[in-house]
Image (cartoon, helix red, strand yellow):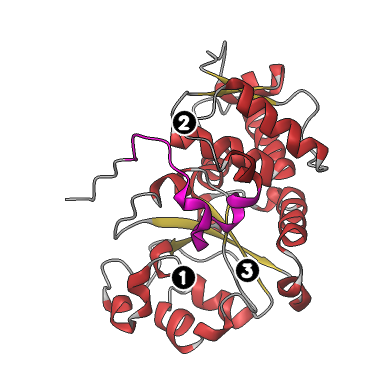
Amino acid sequence: MPPVFIAPAVWQTHWLSHPAYTVWAGVAQPLAGRPNWPDQAALDGLFAHARRQGCPLPAKLRCVLDAEPETYYESHIAHTGEVPTRSNNWHDWFNALAWLVYPRLKTALNARHQAAIASGESQRGPIRDTATLLDECGVLLPYAEPARAAEVDQMRWSALWLTHRADWGRVIDAYPVGHALPEMLLAPFIGLTGKAWLLPVQAEFFSWPLAQRLAHLDQLAAAQLGQLDRPSRLAPLPLLGIPGWHPANADPAFYANTDYFRPQRRAPSVWAE
């Protein structure tokens, strides 16, 4: 049977110090001391703080607790600037943080959904499916060494995370986008997999401060979103294999589980076309 994921029921902030949450921790830090789930005032304050720090959010955009969309979810955001956000809900909480980390990319994703809906793809098709995969479980994988990117695409996990483990964070790294991923990492399970978008960058990228790297990836991914025209552009990525993200992967034997670290892709590779 597939693993059953159950999100923690209560608000907690211990995840802020976990390596898998580095992307989210900076924007969430103002709420680190809260004993309870953020209310509307706290969310509004978080977005106001981000704007004061220069976050290029759309002018009207805000997360509205328990708002009921009058039309398609993405259309509601585009027309009103309101992101419907369920109270006491990890999935929607991390979606709010994703808007703060990747404002340009999230805006571009919303525009892509809107354009697809306008062209008649209201029931989803390759364009909206790909956008949804990125938005829910996507991981940006910038790389400066094509051989490491090829190991991801060809699912050669031992080569990537054992033979060339020292290259991780130096010429290739993972920056989660999808807001379902940090939710599921609160209770990680074998089988947890993301969808990786391999993006070439210059070698100096990896020496920049985190905020600069994230801003660059936000701009780069938003500008190149048109390349994601079908789901096979995204490579499967077993998240618990990422160095530092799961304690078990310090043991090389962890990567011997071929049910999780599958040796080949089910779909033809198109990432480097």
Amino acid found under the numbered disc labelled 2 = Asn
Instruction: Choose mark 2 or mark 3, whichever is in front.
Output: 2
Q: Secondary structure at mark 2?
A: loop
Which quadrant is home to the C terminus? bottom right
Where does label 1 land, which residue? 244
Give the residue at x 36% y 74%. Answer: 249
Magenta segment: 7-26
Give the residue at x 64% y 41%. Answer: 30
Instruction: Choose mark 1 or mark 2, whichever is in front.
Output: 2
> In the figure, is residue 162 to the left or right of 22?
left
Q: Residue furthest top?
A: 70
Quarter of the rendering containing residue 122 = top right
Quarter of the rendering containing residue 8 = top left
Q: Secondary structure at mark 3?
A: loop
Residue 246 visible at all? yes
Q: Position of residue 190 (x, y in %)?
A: 29, 60
Q: Magenta stretch containing residue 13, yes or no? A: yes
Where does label 2 land, which residue? 36
Where does label 3 land, which residue? 272
Amino acid found under the numbered disc labelled 3 = Ala
Of residues 107 and 15, the one nearer the viewer is: 15
Quarter of the rendering containing residue 114 = top right
Q: CA distance from mark 1 to mark 2?
A: 28 Å
Q: CA distance from mark 2 to mark 3?
A: 45 Å
